[in-house]
Image: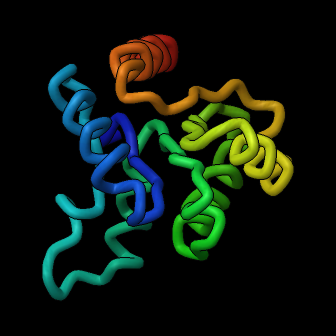
Amino acid sequence: MEYDVFICHASEEKTTVVVPLAKALNDAGIRVWLDEEKIGWGDSVTKEINDGLAKSKFVVVVLSAAFMKKKWPAKEMNAVLNKEIASDITCALPLIVGDSSDKKIILETYPLLADKHYKEWSPSDIGTIVGALKAMLSRYA
């Protein structure tokens, strides 16, 4: 695999969640596929995202109220869940952004994620999230 992790997200979470998370992961030596870095002007968005998903060991799915309103990130999540079901290897790593009511709605909306252990986003817990991903990478090395 070329990348350790692909970050699936709604654009509304880019500044507050995705960019700080990607920076922390990169700083820890974790290879990140992030759309704004990998999709260039004139590139096929679909081709690049398919390529990124195929070449990543894990997909951090940043679940939020904004995510639930978007079709594109949901398609990315569905693709990784299909891959996970077919291979019986954990690929999707849910990261919930929002309060407890958002969490409840997210888990009710996406029942395939309801049985997964998830992390909750907090900028103060970014080190914990990085550490957990490093543990997953060593577990599936």
Where is 30 relative to 61, above or below? above
Where is 42 relative to 29, above or below? below
Q: Nearer the viewer, residue 4 or 10?
A: 10
> In x, y percent, where is residue 53?
44, 55
Residue at image position (43%, 22%) is 129
> In x, y percent, where is residue 81?
68, 50
From the image, which quarter does the N terminus lie in?
Answer: top left
Residue at image position (38%, 39%) is 5
Left or right of 63? Residue 7 is left
The quarter of the picture where residue 24 lies is top left
From the image, which quarter does the C terminus lie in?
Answer: top left
Residue at image position (70%, 24%) is 117
Farthest bottom residue?
42
> In x, y percent, where is residue 45?
34, 78
The quarter of the picture where residue 39 lies is bottom left
> In x, y percent, where is residue 94?
60, 38
Count of number-bearing discs: 0
Where is 66 relative to 4, above or below? below
Left or right of 126? Residue 98 is right
